[in-house]
Image: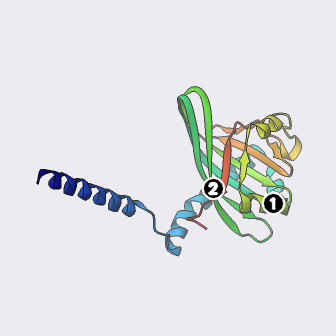
Amino acid sequence: MRRETVRAVILSVMILGFLGLASCATAPKTEVQKEEAQAPLRDMAAQTLAQLYRANPAAQRVVTNAAGYAVFTDFGFKLMFMGGVRGKGMAKNNDTKKETFMEMAELQPGLGLGARRFRAVMIFDTPEAYNKFVTSGWEFGADAMAAAKTKTEGGALAGAVTVSEGVHMYQITEEGLIAGVSITGAKYYKDKDLN
């Protein structure tokens, strides 16, 4: 009889655990919930662009004349030998005005300790570069980082780096625009809950 009791308890715990996991699964968002989650990302994008334009007024013309742009806010951490960054953002097609909400993740191996917050503005010169970014996502690896370090822009794009053909990126901290980009191993992809 004791074995049956133990089995019943184990089975009950397994069922409760399964039900607990099932309840954690997120249900699709309603349109109202999506709009509520999208609003802070729109505000963040507007604030970030305003900060960029204060640091480099000529950047406003570049963003306006581009095929599209994307703005991300990221929070990074580093603890001993491993770190990472998670972020959210939005991309906007300048021609159609359509917004695409996105996420990003970055793995940062290496020794360190601390946290940082930064924002990134990506500018897409061509509709093809923009469409590829929002439909297929994008990975920014060590090769792209090496290329970016050697292609710091000047003029209206001062402070930006070319991270791939037709794509330029500004990185902004709370202190202001920083020269160069320190993102490696990053992946950008559509936010399935907000689109």
Quarter-of-image position of residue 55: top right
In this view of the protein, which residue sits in the foreground, 113 or 15? 15
**Residue, x 56% and y 32% (percent of image)?**
82
User: Which label number is shown at residue 117?
Assistant: none
In this view of the protein, which residue sits in the foreground, 192 or 35? 192
> From what the image shows, is residue 143 above or below residue 127?
above
Label 1: which secondary element: helix
**Residue, x 61% and y 68% (percent of image)?**
195
Quarter containing the N terminus: bottom left
**Residue, x 35% and y 59% (percent of image)?**
18
**Residue, x 68% and y 53% (percent of image)?**
71
Image location of residue 94, percent across then percent down: 78, 65
In this view of the protein, which residue sits in the foreground, 72 or 24? 24
Say what amino acid the circle numbered 2 marks. Gly
The residue that label 2 is drawn on is 89
The residue that label 1 is drawn on is 64
- Residue 174 visible in the picture: no
> From what the image shows, is residue 94 above or below residue 172?
below
- Residue 4 visible in the picture: yes
Circle 1 residues within 10 Å: few <14, some 14–19, many ≥20: few
In this view of the protein, which residue sits in the foreground, 173 or 68? 68
In the image, which is nearer the foreground, mark 2 or mark 1?
2
Say what amino acid the circle numbered 1 marks. Thr
Image location of residue 89, percent across then percent down: 63, 55
Please, which residue is most extreme toward the bottom here? Answer: 31
Render colour scheme: rainbow
Image location of residue 73, percent across then percent down: 61, 49
> From what the image shows, is residue 37 above or below residue 3?
below
